[in-house]
Amino acid sequence: MRIDFDPAKDVLNIKNHGLSLAAAAELEWDWLVSHEDNTLHDYYEQRMVGFAPKGADIFCVVFVERDDDHIRVISLRKATKKEVRDYVASQN
Protein backbone atom coordinates (compact mmCIF):
# COMPACT_ATOMS: atom_id res chain seq x y z
CA MET A 1 0.00 0.00 0.00
CA ARG A 2 1.27 3.45 -0.86
CA ILE A 3 0.88 6.08 1.86
CA ASP A 4 1.55 9.77 1.44
CA PHE A 5 0.89 12.98 3.36
CA ASP A 6 1.40 16.72 3.25
CA PRO A 7 4.79 17.61 4.81
CA ALA A 8 3.27 20.74 6.42
CA LYS A 9 0.55 18.61 8.06
CA ASP A 10 3.26 16.23 9.24
CA VAL A 11 5.00 19.07 11.11
CA LEU A 12 1.68 20.03 12.74
CA ASN A 13 0.89 16.41 13.62
CA ILE A 14 4.27 15.98 15.30
CA LYS A 15 3.68 19.19 17.25
CA ASN A 16 0.09 18.29 18.25
CA HIS A 17 0.32 14.52 18.74
CA GLY A 18 4.02 13.66 18.94
CA LEU A 19 3.77 11.37 15.90
CA SER A 20 4.92 11.68 12.32
CA LEU A 21 2.31 10.85 9.70
CA ALA A 22 4.93 8.51 8.26
CA ALA A 23 4.21 6.18 11.21
CA ALA A 24 0.87 5.35 9.54
CA ALA A 25 2.83 3.01 7.28
CA GLU A 26 3.47 0.85 10.35
CA LEU A 27 -0.22 0.43 11.22
CA GLU A 28 -1.79 -2.98 10.77
CA TRP A 29 -4.16 -1.79 8.03
CA ASP A 30 -5.71 -5.25 7.69
CA TRP A 31 -7.22 -4.70 11.16
CA LEU A 32 -8.54 -1.20 10.38
CA VAL A 33 -12.05 -0.29 11.53
CA SER A 34 -13.19 2.88 9.78
CA HIS A 35 -16.17 5.09 9.00
CA GLU A 36 -16.83 8.28 7.07
CA ASP A 37 -15.92 11.52 8.82
CA ASN A 38 -19.32 13.06 9.53
CA THR A 39 -18.11 16.31 11.06
CA LEU A 40 -19.66 19.58 10.00
CA HIS A 41 -16.56 20.57 8.02
CA ASP A 42 -17.09 20.79 4.27
CA TYR A 43 -14.00 19.09 2.86
CA TYR A 44 -13.42 18.75 -0.86
CA GLU A 45 -12.87 15.02 -0.40
CA GLN A 46 -14.44 12.15 1.58
CA ARG A 47 -12.37 11.72 4.71
CA MET A 48 -12.38 8.53 6.71
CA VAL A 49 -11.70 8.07 10.43
CA GLY A 50 -10.15 4.75 11.31
CA PHE A 51 -8.66 2.82 14.18
CA ALA A 52 -5.87 0.32 13.72
CA PRO A 53 -3.26 -1.36 15.89
CA LYS A 54 0.47 -0.93 15.81
CA GLY A 55 2.00 -3.39 18.23
CA ALA A 56 0.05 -3.27 21.48
CA ASP A 57 -1.37 0.24 20.87
CA ILE A 58 -4.42 1.41 18.92
CA PHE A 59 -4.16 4.54 16.79
CA CYS A 60 -6.72 6.90 15.29
CA VAL A 61 -5.96 7.79 11.69
CA VAL A 62 -7.82 10.26 9.46
CA PHE A 63 -7.24 9.54 5.79
CA VAL A 64 -8.51 9.72 2.23
CA GLU A 65 -8.55 6.68 -0.03
CA ARG A 66 -7.07 7.73 -3.38
CA ASP A 67 -7.54 4.26 -4.87
CA ASP A 68 -7.31 0.62 -3.75
CA ASP A 69 -3.68 0.79 -2.71
CA HIS A 70 -3.06 4.53 -2.17
CA ILE A 71 -3.93 6.39 1.03
CA ARG A 72 -3.31 10.03 1.92
CA VAL A 73 -2.95 10.42 5.70
CA ILE A 74 -4.27 13.63 7.25
CA SER A 75 -3.90 12.97 10.98
CA LEU A 76 -2.52 10.27 13.29
CA ARG A 77 -2.70 9.97 17.06
CA LYS A 78 -2.98 7.39 19.81
CA ALA A 79 -6.57 6.39 20.42
CA THR A 80 -8.30 7.49 23.62
CA LYS A 81 -9.25 4.91 26.24
CA LYS A 82 -12.87 4.98 25.04
CA GLU A 83 -11.78 4.57 21.41
CA VAL A 84 -9.62 1.59 22.40
CA ARG A 85 -12.58 -0.02 24.23
CA ASP A 86 -14.83 0.55 21.20
CA TYR A 87 -12.19 -0.89 18.86
CA VAL A 88 -11.70 -4.00 21.01
CA ALA A 89 -15.48 -4.48 21.24
CA SER A 90 -15.76 -4.27 17.44
CA GLN A 91 -13.26 -7.12 17.09
CA ASN A 92 -15.33 -9.56 19.19
Image: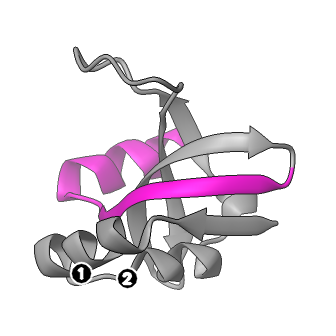
Which residue is labeled 2 in the image? Answer: 20
Q: Residue at x 46, y 23 (%)?
A: 44
* Identity of the residue drawn at 32% across and 65% down: 9
Q: Distance between the residues labelled 2 and 1?
A: 5 Å
**Residue 15 horizontal/vertical position (percent):** 14, 79
Report if the CB atoms under discs 2 and 1 are less than 8 Å apart.
yes
Q: From the viewer's side, name the closer residue of 45 and 37.
A: 45
- Kind of residue at disc 1: Ile
Q: Is mark 1 on a helix, strand or loop?
A: helix
Residue labelled with disc 1: 14
**In terms of image quadrants, where is residue 92?**
top right
Tell me which corner region of the image, top left, top right, bottom left or bottom right, holds residue 16. Answer: bottom left
> Looking at the picture, how far across and down is residue 78, in whole percent?
29, 69
Callout 2: few (<14), some (14-19), or many (20+) C-alpha neighbours within 10 Å? some
Whether residue 60 can be seen here: yes
Compare marks 2 and 1 and give the one earlier in the sequence: 1
Residue 26, percent from left and from top: 61, 82
Residue at 59% from the left image edge and 55% from the top image edge: 72
**What is the count of numbered marks?**
2
Q: Which colour scheme is used?
A: one colour
